[in-house]
Image: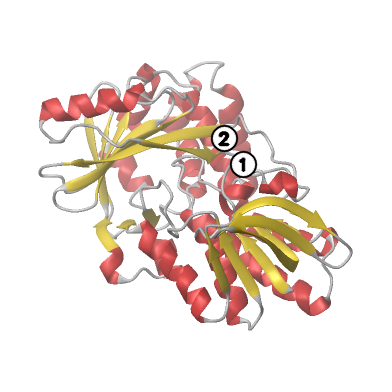
Amino acid sequence: MHDAVIVGAGPAGSMAALELAKAGLDAALIDHRHRIGDKLCTGVIGAECADRFPVPPDLTYHRASSAVIHSPAGRRYTVEHPQTQALIVDRVAYIAGIAREAESRGAELRLGYTVRGVEKSADRVAIRASGAGEDRLFEGRLLIAASGFGHSLTKMAGLEPGNQRDFLMGCQAEVRVSDLDSTQVFLGQDVARSSFGWLVPTSPATALLGTISRSRDQSGLARLASRLRAQGGVTSDLAGVRHWGIPLKPIPKTYGERVMALGDAAGFAKPITGGGIYYAMLSGLLAARTAIDALDAEDFSAGFLSRYESAWKREFGDELRIGYYARMLFESMSDAQIELLMETFLSSEVQEQLINSPDFSFDRHSRTILRTVGHRRIARLIASFGPSVAPFLTRLLKSAVFLR
């Protein structure tokens, strides 16, 4: 019997397996995929994430300290910071490297196994899975669920899946480009309803073109691709588009008897950008630490494992909560209102005060969000948009007061 069975070899599960293996514990890491880390994602991580979980230099496509934001009306705003704020990385190789390191330290890595059921008993958790032409039972004293957004594993393990309607849909394709040296962000209902699109360089000649939106209708991506082809920035047709879901809120409870949920399975993604790599890896680290303590204490009760939820809430819970309110505020605005907000927020004066400040972080948005809504000019402007924005502006302003 394993000390822990981890389902999902993404950033959360692989990090948990690595930490458990480092501690000399017996961990099994299983995944339905044969290619580790192969999930739809832009591969953008912040500088804090890269410092905490270093990326091999040969896996870094691009280092970004600036971006160009295109308003709904087509105005261009360049946002620059003195230091590198984000890295575009080879996500597949980055995550696979963590899983392989866990394996080299003693974790059992099993790919191509699909979970069919979970059974709990007084002294173990049994995970029934099929793969490699066989049905197999993986038994452990703990189950660590890192199976991704919308997977049935959390429900099988006795955790509520939460509001499955509160999510974003992403779509993305690789395109060929010319003269692209910085990330481009596109706003406007024509591109992505209540959200945004992007063009992220991965080499001098290629980029990732994508959108995220509440809508399942992804025609905005086709319109954006057509516009960029007409302008000459994108030089290939749109082909091979792939889709994925992005959670916007954590599930109601991320722990239970002999189980913890991590990463997208727990609903850990930045509500503003949809990025999930950093919080997934942090949740893997925190879950592993809780698992080590539980194994030492021989206590796998929900009460003992609740310390995992307390830990992630301390680490990034405010980021998820405040980011969600900010997204709801943004979604309540029309294109005309977003245009006015961008004109003020992206002015050189306000950029200097907010974006170029020492505490600006690509990985942690809450402080910048609260400083933005607390900025006198911006607060007055948003308040002038009327009752549709009032509930979310009020919640953010209360958070700003609470966190001072």
Q: Quadrant location of residue 195? A: top left
Q: Report crowding for label 2: few under 14, some 14 to 19, many 20 or more residues within 10 A (C-alpha).
A: many
Q: Report crowding for label 1: few under 14, some 14 to 19, many 20 or more residues within 10 A (C-alpha).
A: some
- In the image, taking residue 312 as reference, residue 230 lies left or right, namely left
The Cα–Cα distance between marks 1 and 2, rounded to whole angstroms, is 10 Å
Q: Residue, x 70% and y 56% (percent of image)?
A: 128
Q: Mark 2 is on which residue type?
A: Tyr
Residue furthest toward the right? 122
Q: Residue, x 24% and y 36% (percent of image)?
A: 77
Residue 298 locus on image (x, y percent): 83, 75
Q: Could you tell me which quadrant the N terminus lies in?
A: bottom right
Q: Nearer the viewer, mark 1 or mark 2?
A: 2
Q: Which mark is residue 276?
A: none
Residue 277 locus on image (x, y percent): 47, 55
- Let me know if residue 404 appears in the view: no
The residue under label 2 is: 325
The residue under label 1 is: 399
Q: Is residue 223 above or below residue 102?
A: above
Q: Is residue 143 above or below residue 362?
A: below
Q: Quadrant location of residue 187? A: top left
Looking at the picture, tell me which residue is in the foreground, 233 or 353: 233
- In the image, taking residue 332 as reference, residue 309 lies left or right, namely right
Q: Mark 1 is on which residue type?
A: Ser
- In the image, taking residue 115 as reference, residue 171 lies left or right, namely left
Verify CB contact (< 8 Å) between mark 1 and mark 2: yes
